[in-house]
Amino acid sequence: MKFGDAFTFVFQDPDWFKKIIIPGLIGLIIPVVGQLFLLGWSLKVALNVIRNNPNPLPNMEFGADLGRGFKAWVVGLVYAIPMLIFYLPILILTAIASNSDQQSMGLVVGVASACFGFLMFLYSIVLGLLMPAAYARVAVHDSIGAGLAFGEVFKMVKSNLVTYLLILLGTALASFIASLGSIACVVGIFVTAPYAFAIMGHLYGQGYVVSKQLTA
């Protein structure tokens, strides 16, 4: 896996600024829809990497990118269900404690919050490993079902755990880069946010390629 390429490939395109700033403006100005579009655009980066496109920074195609992003969002929502299940007991116990005068309920809520919070933390790591594989499958097959093929997704990650740990690290770095845009009076985020999405898309594509090579 070429980890560093995910951070540098953007600048190899002579039109990189135009290809970055337009998705950035759309992604951040239009609520909800813009985020789905930006996710779909990043998965086109992944698809170009998987197809060995020599210039993987794609032009935007609003309708196609939005559709791809919506499919990925549905997949992500399904994978997030366990997180919601872990959080539900905390909400219920907190509501009960707020209507109770017993101090012991506060202790119960504290212990339960710590336990379920730890489970949520562990699952967030699992989610960070699984989603890049699931998203890449959505990009390749252009379907929600491909991302929800849990057996295939688990197989990709299990057979290539080190690579997906690197992708998890790269995703964290990309998120940090995106946050740096707020320093320049928030304006910089129109560049750093789509750049971060491009990084993640490139990493997803690399993960898919390496996984397929190992399982071929």
Image (tube, grey):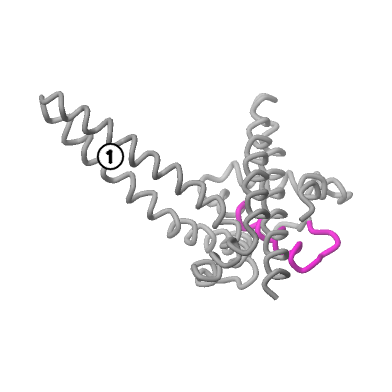
Label 1, secondary structure: give it. helix
Residue 164 magenta? no
Q: Residue at x 41, y 44 (%)?
A: 120
Q: Residue furthest bottom?
A: 216
Q: Which residues are magenta?
A: 38-56
Return the residue nearer the eye: 173 or 158. Answer: 158
Q: Position of residue 118 (x, y in %)?
A: 40, 40
- Say which residue appears at 87% left-offset and 49% top-offset: 12
Quadrant that contains the C terminus: bottom right
Find out whether residue 42 is within the magenta segment. yes
Classify residue 170 as left or right of residue 56: left
Q: Is residue 156 left or right of residue 74?
A: right
Which image quadrant is residue 211 in?
bottom right
| Left or right placement of residue 125 versus residue 196 in this view | left
**Residue 149 drawn at (x, y percent):** 50, 71
Q: Work out which residue is located at the far left of the displayed protein and give it.
A: 101
Residue appearing at x 80%, y 44% in the figure: 17
Of residue 181 and residue 119, the one placed in the foreground of this image is 119
Residue identifier under label 1: 90
Q: Amino acid at mark 1?
A: Ile
Q: Is residue 63 above or below residue 22?
A: below
Foreground residue among 96 and 192: 96
**Side of 140 relative to 13 (left or right):** left
Q: Position of residue 178 (x, y in %)?
A: 65, 37
Q: Position of residue 81 (x, y in %)?
A: 38, 55
